[in-house]
Image (cartoon, rainbow, N blue to C red):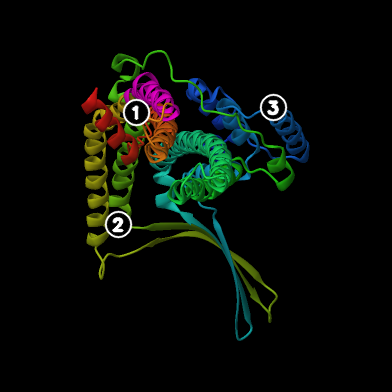
Amino acid sequence: MNTAPAVQKTSIALAVLLLAGCATVNINESIEQTNQELNGFTKGQLSLVQTDAQRQAMAAKASDILKEPLSQPAAVELMLTHSPQFQTVLAESWAQAALAAQGGRIHNPVFAFERLRIRDELELGRLLSFGLLDLLSFPARQGIARTQIDRAQLQLTGNVVDQVTQVRQAWVDAVAAQQAHTYAQQVFESAQTSAELARRMQEVGNFTRLQRARQHSFYADAAVNLAATRHKATSSREALVRMLGLSSEQAAQLKLPERLPDLPEAPKAPSEVAKRGEDRLDVRMAKQGFEASVKSQGLGNIASFLDIEAGVRYDTDFENDTGERSNKKGYEIELALPIFDWGGMKRDAMNANTLAAANRLEATLRNAQSTLRESYSAYRTTYDIARHYRDEILPLKQTIADENLLRYNGMFIGVFELLADSRDQVNTVVQAINAQADFWRADAALQATVVGKPMTVSVSGAAANAGGNAGGGH
């Protein structure tokens, strides 16, 4: 029986099977998987723009979205499909997954050719070599590659959650800043009118110089506040523009709602946001990291001791004098001898990495529910503060302002008391807007934390202090 053809066919079949079993990455399938996993979070609008036709379609879609005042869901949709910054995140995730898949493939064989002349003898040497250890460890490396690809998939999902949360919070900042600027404009116009009225009343002798100066001081403060809120509105709007990736023409088309959405009738119950720790995104990522470390350590322990290269040699000798030609066939094996380096440091490093991954997993499990409780506390606290402003503080301030105006008209109080009350009312309205914005930021952070991307928000000092004061007097 001629065994050479059989061996050749077997080798070819084995190579085909190995290549067919190589891990591959399809970015479209990966994005679709992320869409399914985050369907309730992104509404399945994630897509990677790769062709000019797709870019034109997305530009047309962006134009349609920008025709109406931009709501928060529309801002998320616009960022997911149009923002170059977000498309960069998708492309980098694609590259990361492709590199992970590449790590599970067999290294290409190396062909070496040599030509030697010894007196009248010419020798041509041919060597086809490959890493025998790579071949033997192929199943293990495939497993590591698939684990890393799965981890890249989870990393993509986490990045999407992060970007969506950022654009939601940027939208809240922009709308709240615009709302505060609009109110500052109204206060400024009112103060301007009052200052002009005071000037005229002083001219006819109905106001003292001190009374007019106090009116004018209120007007001057309103002008400073208007300038500050104008800049904040501009900077917040531009931050949103950058997150959405709008061009100058598109930024000019951007229209924001006049005010933040109303508070929900009731806050979410703790049971609505509770989620099993094992299903959270951060826990799954930590598990994937631990599994990848364990698999890499198993393969790395072997590779730290030895490295084997196998090759097939085919040489030809020519005798120039006689014209004879002879062929030599054989094989060679190269084995790295662990004389100077036994790989102890490599194994220590792998042990340390695996230990770190195990501790990271344990820490993530312990932190998962804690971050959820903290995020829910921020959500509930900001809700209670914003509702307290809406239901208690603002109506009380309005009642006080109405009563003071009646007392001023009846000459029971002076202009100084009336101005002090006006300043207090203006501050209260601004704090109410900030409290409402804090709630919507906390709501966005809570949504991300429930999915498994912990984000914390701080309850602003102004709102907290104001709420505490108000609560103390309530």
Residue 374: x and y, percent? 27, 31
Q: Secondary structure at mark 2?
A: helix
- Please report whichever mark, 1 or 3, sits nearer to the chain's N-terminal start: 3
**Residue at label 1?**
382
**Residue at label 2?**
304
Closest to the observer: 445 or 421? 421
Does residue 456 appear in the picture of this structure? no
Q: Alpha carbon of mark 3 to alpha carbon of mark 2: how far?
A: 62 Å
Q: Secondary structure at mark 1?
A: helix
- Asked whether the beta carbons under mark 2 and mark 1 sit within 8 Å of each other, the answer is no
Q: Is 98 above or below relative to 271?
A: below
- Please report whichever mark, 3 or 2, sits nearer to the chain's N-terminal start: 3
Residue 148 falls inside the magenta stretch:
no
Q: Amino acid at mark 1?
A: Thr
Q: Alpha carbon of mark 2 to alpha carbon of mark 1: how far?
A: 55 Å
Q: Which labelled disc corresponds to residue 68?
A: 3
- Asked whether the beta carbons under mark 1 and mark 3 sit within 8 Å of each other, the answer is no
- Provide the residue span drawn in magenta: 383-409
Q: Horizontal placement of 357 versus 218: left or right?
A: left
Q: Local crowd at mark 2 within 10 Å, few (<14), some, or many (≥20)?
A: some
Residue at point 57% right, 23% down?
A: 44
What's the magenta bit mostly, secondary-structure-wise?
helix
Q: Amino acid at mark 3?
A: Glu
Residue at point 29% right, 41% down?
A: 294
Residue 13: x and y, percent? 56, 36
Q: Local crowd at mark 3 within 10 Å, few (<14), some, or many (≥20)?
A: some
Does residue 49 appear in the picture of this structure? yes
Which quadrant would residue 174 be assigned to in this image?
top right
Q: Horizontal placement of 327 versus 339: left or right?
A: right
Residue 385 falls inside the magenta stretch:
yes
Q: Amino acid at mark 2?
A: Ser
